[in-house]
Amino acid sequence: RYNYFAKVAKQAGASRVAVGHTADDQVETIFLNIVRGAGVRGLKGMTPISERHSKRDSTLLIVRPLLEVSRTETSAYCKELGLSPRIDVSNYSPAFLRNRVRNILPQLESLNPAIRKAFLRLSKSAGEAVELLDTEVAKAWPQVIAQHGESSIKLNKKQLLQLPAAVQRHVLLVAWERLRGDPQDLEAIHIEEIVASLARPVG
């Protein structure tokens, strides 16, 4: 989808694309990331402005102006102005994990009526933690990176292992992003496996 957006934006001469993600989408994203086993970056969820890098070396600036507005508020706004939003029928298909997560959230609200606000607070705290980790990685990067090319990054294992565990993991995540772009398919367990392999003999 985003690769298509990037293609259309380039054809139109646009520098960014605005999408309609709401606060409810943010909650679903965080919950979905937890289910998938994401790390602290996943708990952060989506950001109001983000860059998405594709494997074709194209960069798309994504803007989410409605990220702090609820789905109920957007629906009420459209109704008030007589607008008829387009509905993607795939949003109702149980074949997609996000839709199944969307159906679970009301059950969680029976345990905690403010569960959505709790997820959003978690997102804010995780975002602050990620900012700190990004700063630490930027400081350590010159010492940890032995070689950085277009298609490969070589890490200095000795220097990497001297970093705090959380920074080690974040260095690996940043390295992945710089090589592959979107880290969506990279889960916390993959990072843990890489860190564990550093302590093993070569082989």
Image (spheres, rainbow, N blue to C red):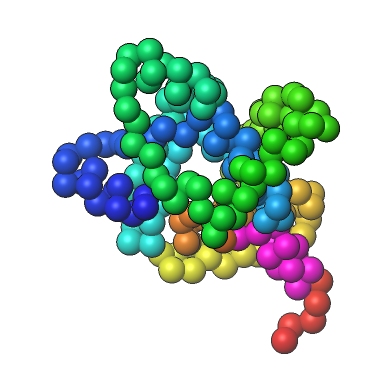
- State the residue in front, 105 or 167: 105
Between 201 and 80, the one nearer to me in the picture: 80
Q: Is residue 56 above or below residue 167?
A: below
Residue at 38 percent across and 39 percent down: it is 87
Q: Evaluate whether residue 102 shows in this view.
A: yes
Is residue 194 shown in magenta? Answer: yes
Quadrant for residue 109, please give it.
top right
Question: What residue is shown at x 55% (from left), y 36% (from top)?
Answer: 25
Q: In the image shown, does 97 or 134 lie closer to the viewer?
A: 97
Q: In the figure, is residue 139 to the left or right of 1?
A: right
In the image, residue 118 lies at what x, y percent?
74, 28
Q: Does the magenta segment cover residue 64?
A: no
For this orientation, the residue located farthest to the top is: 80
The image shows residue 170, relative to residue 149, as above or below, that is above
Magenta stretch: dominant secondary structure: helix
The C terminus lies in quadrant: bottom right
Specify start and end residues of the magenta stretch as a single range: 186-198
The vertical placement of 90 against 81, above or below, is below
Q: In x, y percent, where is residue 150?
A: 41, 64
> On the picture, is 22 further left or further right than 192?
left
